Image: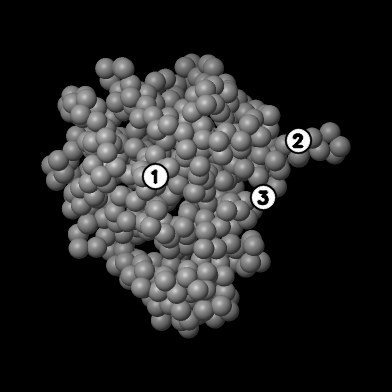
Amino acid sequence: MKTLEPRRFLAIALLAVLPAAACVAEDDGALDDSKSDSPDRLIELPFYFSVPKTAVAVPLERNKYPYPTLWNPSVQDAGVGLRVIAVQQGSTVASKQAARRDMAAKLAAAGVLQDGDIALTFRPELAGTMAYPHIQMGVTHSGLVYTKNGQAFNIDSPLDSEYMGQFDAKHYAGGGDDQGTNALHIVRPRAMTPERRAQLREWITTLQAALPRINGERAQIKFQSDYLTPAYKSAGATTRQTITRLGQIILEADTVTKQPMYCSEFAWHMLALSNCTADQIRTAPPEGADCVDEVFAPAPLTEPAAGQIGMADGPLRALLAIPAENRGGLVDSIFATGDAAKLSSGHRMVAEQVAPLMVPLSQLYGARATGATVENVAPIATMLNGAVANNYSPTTFLVESVEDDRLRVMDYVVTVEFVDASGMAKAKKLAKLPVP
């Protein structure tokens, strides 16, 4: 038992930061659009920021929107990459805002953006930096998509003007000290029916009307910066109870309880709440409303058994989609330290703190890459998973979309990439090639 204690310490320290893909990050580094010089790629994309091509199954009606769509293969293997819709933008904040509003309107009209979709802030410029952002697949924030008058909008924790809007707030388009973001992954819960989408819009409308009171004088659902402790753990409650309580706060049936949430936690709760009517939430018993429906269960760090994908398993799924004979050195590239200067000061501090602690996870990756089964690495997975509560980090939404199709609860739809004029010209050429 004593020989396991050092590993136990490493696991605890590792888990203290891995779920914390920053919803409100210090993205103060220079924004890099990661253009590729390769003739077959728009973005210089490593495999660990990619999804298997087999996971790209949602059909797109490309004739209904004006932007080019292309397959952007990873540098290491064409079987993993991203399906990209390229949207041209200018260099000023105003032009970037206009491009995002145009995108939100046109992609909503084409069905590419739908109520309940999750928009994940993706930063390809974090490739080749440190293991922490690599494991997070370059994802740093999650927003919830809803539609109004046929156009798409986003509502995100921390529920303020720097994040909410039509993907044109500072976080998305830049402004002040925020550089914005040039790429968004769109993923879609399979559980969302037309009825749930309509119900979600009602919950969002009610929240927006009450928000000045809920997060003003009462400060009930302010931003939560402790990503390691989800609301159900900090409250000593079940997820059914925290989802119900959020609904009661939105309805102002509860004007006392404070339930702060980080970005992905808020989105996850709202999706679960979309299966409920206001009356069902108002009359819910203390144990919570029966109607609440989690789109996925809070996830462990790494797969403890077949069919239970973990928050840190996204790069591993991409790795296993590459032929075994071509995997040499790829595990090392995930866990290597490269140009850390690309990271913001906040990300760099966290990444440096956990750099020595990646050993157990890299060992698990290495074993799986060389043929070990989930059962073979179960002792390592159990050790890693045992130190923290199951969670729902922003990256988890993307990871859930690369699970085996029979078990998949989220679908990867597309990655929206904002480009300049030269990038758009290249995207139009690449769009003539086969696209999944």
Q: Quadrant of residue 37?
A: top left
Is 37 left or right of 25, judged from the image as shown? Answer: left
Say which residue label 2 marks. 7
Residue sitting nearer the eye, 54 or 28: 28
Question: In the image, what residue occupies the spot 42% across and 20% down?
Answer: 76
- Label 3 vs label 1: CA separation? 36 Å
Question: In the image, what residue occupies the spot 41% across and 70% down?
Answer: 211
Q: Between tags 2 and 1, which lies in front?
A: 1
- Count of numbered tags: 3
Alpha-carbon neighbours of circle 3 within 10 Å: few (<14), some, or many (≥20)?
A: some
> In the image, what residue type sits under mark 1?
Gly
Question: In the image, what residue occupies the spot 31% across and 63% down?
Answer: 197
Q: Is residue 73 shown to the viewer in this render?
A: no
Quadrant placement of the C terminus: top left
Residue sitting nearer the eye, 306 or 136: 136
Say which residue label 1 marks. 176
> In the image, what residue type sits under mark 3?
Val
> In the image, what residue type sits under mark 2?
Arg
Say which residue label 3 marks. 388
Q: Is residue 298 shown to the viewer in this render?
A: yes
Image coordinates of residue 39 in percent, x first then y, are 26, 17
- N-terminal of the two: label 2 or label 3? 2
